[in-house]
Every structure is written in structure tokens, then in C-alpha cells.
Image (cartoon, rainbow, N blue to C red):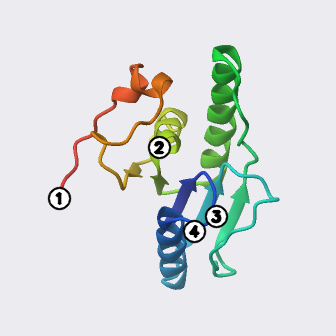
Amino acid sequence: MRLTFIISSLSHGGAERVMSIMANYWVKKGWKVTILTFAGAEMLPDYDLDERVTHIPLGLMSDSYDLISGLWNNIHRILRLRDAIYNSKPDVVISFIDTVNVLTLIASKNLKIPVLVSERNNPAKYYIGNTWENSEIGHIYLPIAL
């Protein structure tokens, strides 16, 4: 089994810690695990990763100062992320945290790879940002089998 995890960074945080634990667990079971982060190589992980986990920092974090730069940055992120997902040859993609989840779903469209997204907040009480809240992209609902 080949897993690809996607998150903004592996700096301090609960989701980052959970991802590192999951990656280490599955790589010890003999699975091939890749972690793609939006952060660049200068942002080192705050959590230990097994040496068999492949961490690929994509360097996609940048500020957007207006609508045009925001659109451009997200198109660039989607294209780079799509390429990185494809090249990691995963059986399954697992993405963590709000906007990364949305970008992962868009980037993986038509790749025929199952994508799981993980949120750990209450959407009714968590504001993702005006652009994301008021767009069709921000209103993606997926059925979850429990």
C-alpha cells in the first residue's frame, strides 16, 4: 500500500502530530508513505518521522495580497500539488486541514485516486475565510461512512 499525506506543514499542532504518528505507524507496517507539505524545506518538522517516510516540502506557502494574486497562487498550488500527488503514485491520499483539503480535492480531480480529508473543528464555529466561505468550492460536502 502506498499512502500520500498532505498538510500545510509539520510544525507544532495537533493535526501535524497526528499525521506524523500515522505516517510512522504505517511505514513500520511496511507501507510506502509520502508526506507532501505546502511549507518549504526551511521549515523542518517539529515531530520525528521514521527515516523511511518520504517528506517532500513543496514550498507553496505564500501570501496573497489581492484577489488576482490569490487566484494565481492557488492555481500554482493546485498544479504543483497535482504533479506531486501523481508522482508519489499513491493508492490513497489523506489530507488534513481546511484549505489544504479543498486544494487537494481540486488537485486530485480525475486522477482516479481515493482521497480522504480530515477536519478537526466545528465548521459552524470555525471561519475559513471570506473567499472560501462564499464560493462554490467552500461548499463541498462529502458523505462519510461511519
Q: Is residue 49 above or below residue 138?
A: below
Q: Distance between the residues labelled 1 and 4?
A: 25 Å
Determine which residue is flagged by label 1. 146
Q: For label 2, count other residues whose C-alpha is less than 10 Å away and answer few (under 14), some (14-19) or many (20+).
A: many
Is 54 placed above or below 27 here?
above
Three-letter amino acid code at the position of disc 4: Val
* Kind of residue indicated by mark 1: Leu
Determine the secondary structure under disc 2: helix
Residue, disc 4: 33
Disc 3 marks which amino acid? Ser
First of labels 3, 1 by sequence position: 3
Q: Residue furthest left?
A: 146
Tell me the SS state at disc 3: loop
* Residue reaching furthest to the bottom: 28
Residue 82, percent across and down? 61, 39
Residue 85's place in the image compared with 19, above or below, is: above
Under circle 1, the secondary element is loop
**Residue underneath mark 2:** 101
State if disc 3 and disc 2 touch (CB < 8 Å): no
Other-residue count near label 4 (Cα within 10 Å), few / some / many at <14 / 14–19 / ≥20: many
Determine the secondary structure under disc 4.
strand
CA gap, disc 2 and disc 4: 18 Å
Q: Which of marks 4 and 3 is nearer the N terminus?
A: 3
